[in-house]
Amino acid sequence: MVKGYHLLDKEKYMHKPQMVTQEEINQIYQERLNGVSSFKTNLYPLLTDKNGTQTNHYPIFFVYLPEIVKLESDLRDNSNKIKELSKNLPGIAKQQFLNSLLVSEIAYTNRIEGVETDRGEISTIIRENEENSQRPFHKRLQSTIRMYQETQSDHLIKIEQLKDFRDIYNTLLEGEIDSDKLPNGKLFRDELPEGERLRIGDALHTVHIPPQTEKDINEALSSLIEFMNDDELPSIYKSLITHFFFENTHPFLDGNGRMGRYLLSTYISHKYDHFTGFSIATAIHSRVQTYYRIFKEADKTENYAELTLFILEMLKILVAQQEEIVTTLTDDKQQLEEIKANISQQIKDIDGSYDKVAFYAILLYLGESKLFASNKELAILDRDIIQLNSKENSISIRRTKMALDKLEKLGWIRKINSRPKQHEIILK
């Protein structure tokens, strides 16, 4: 929390022994809403008060607190640090680190929804998608992973009509949604059978009650499209407000959280960097109670659709994750230099009859892979090494294969897979 700044539902308790009246709360609200440091949107979320009464009469707004401005600056500075650190990484290392982040991102965005996913399975699909870009989807998660991978092309998804939301949903979550949880309206969900009401929460507690009809969802998302395509607001604030409003509207029966985090991920990947973009669900998962709390607070009528502290806390979550990435990349860069030095020393000490050039290239690729790939399913294959040696080092296929055999016999590498053939370095 920011010292001296509170959500409006807490404000009346901050001036004891005398309670603040509702009239005074309303005055504080108007001062915040119309202040020179505030930004007011055209988005009207559905809010619920403590008695269960709902309203959508308050526009989303936030106040540019100094802490928020500082965090936005930190986010951009960290993104620049990440870009600079990653720019100096070899191609294999950079891609494998991104893929490792993506494995965690997919695993955590599912886990937040109570869906457990095997990391090895995710890694295998990432590799298959890279090697067979035109292969039809056939595995669970394959479409989801491909959608995330496509964000690396720097092509920003444009949402200009309601159908675009549904198209993204269909592709992102292909095969992931049970048939009885697919949208029951033309594009989105519609009213449930008489006597039933969609609510978000567990068996005992309701966290939020979203719009109940497709007509209301259409109206809400139409205003969101207008907001998303207006460039008046800086990117990060727009993306966080969009994230909140999409989740508040909850246009589908299932998969809203996964789609909302995907939209946030792809937007930040485009506007900042892919490393930050591929760490959204990871960041949220590590601070998931804060994430749930700020959504719950922002959904209260008593807070008048103010997102100041929602934005503040989300920025803290993202900046903290970036700092972990910066630390990891800095440490890995140092370790990579040590690996290079060790490889050079090992090769320097062997008999001159060995192919030292091929040895060095192979060991370096394997060293990078061991350091940056999070599991063997992501690690470099022999065929990748052969291709890279041919393309980048002018080393023939035959020469690379012979060098791999000799390195294995020397005990410098070991085979960890036969089909496809794969080795790992034994670091000394």
Image (cartoon, helix red, strand yellow):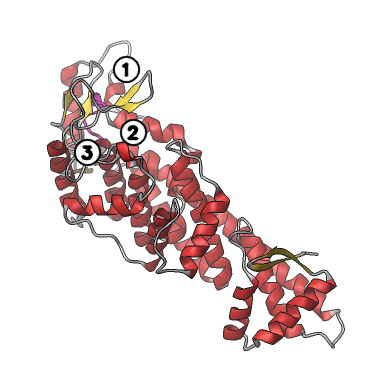
**Type of residue at label 1?**
Tyr
Residue annotated with mark 1: 13
Q: Is residue 407 visible?
A: yes
Residue annotated with mark 2: 295
Q: Is residue 89 visible?
A: no
Q: Which residues are magenta?
A: 300-308
**Type of residue at label 3?**
Asn
Q: Nearer the viewer, mark 1 or mark 3?
A: 3
Structural distance between the alpha carbons of marks 3 and 2: 26 Å
Percent coordinates x, y for residue 177 in the rendering? 36, 42
**Vertical position of residue 352 compared to residue 148: above or below:** below
Does the magenta run of residues contain 305?
Answer: yes
If the image is split into quadrants, where does the N terminus sit?
A: top left
Who comes first in sequence, dot 1 or dot 2? 1
**Vertical position of residue 201 compared to residue 393: above or below:** above
Percent coordinates x, y for residue 400 in the rendering? 69, 82
Rendering quarter of residue 25 = top left
Structural distance between the alpha carbons of marks 1 and 3: 44 Å
Does the magenta run of residues contain 28?
Answer: no
**Vertical position of residue 163 compared to residue 18: above or below:** below
Tag 2, which secondary structure?
helix
Q: Nearer the viewer, residue 36 or 232?
A: 232
Q: On the rendered structure, is 172 left or right of 221?
A: right
Residue annotated with mark 3: 184
Who comes first in sequence, dot 1 or dot 3? 1
Who comes first in sequence, dot 3 or dot 2? 3
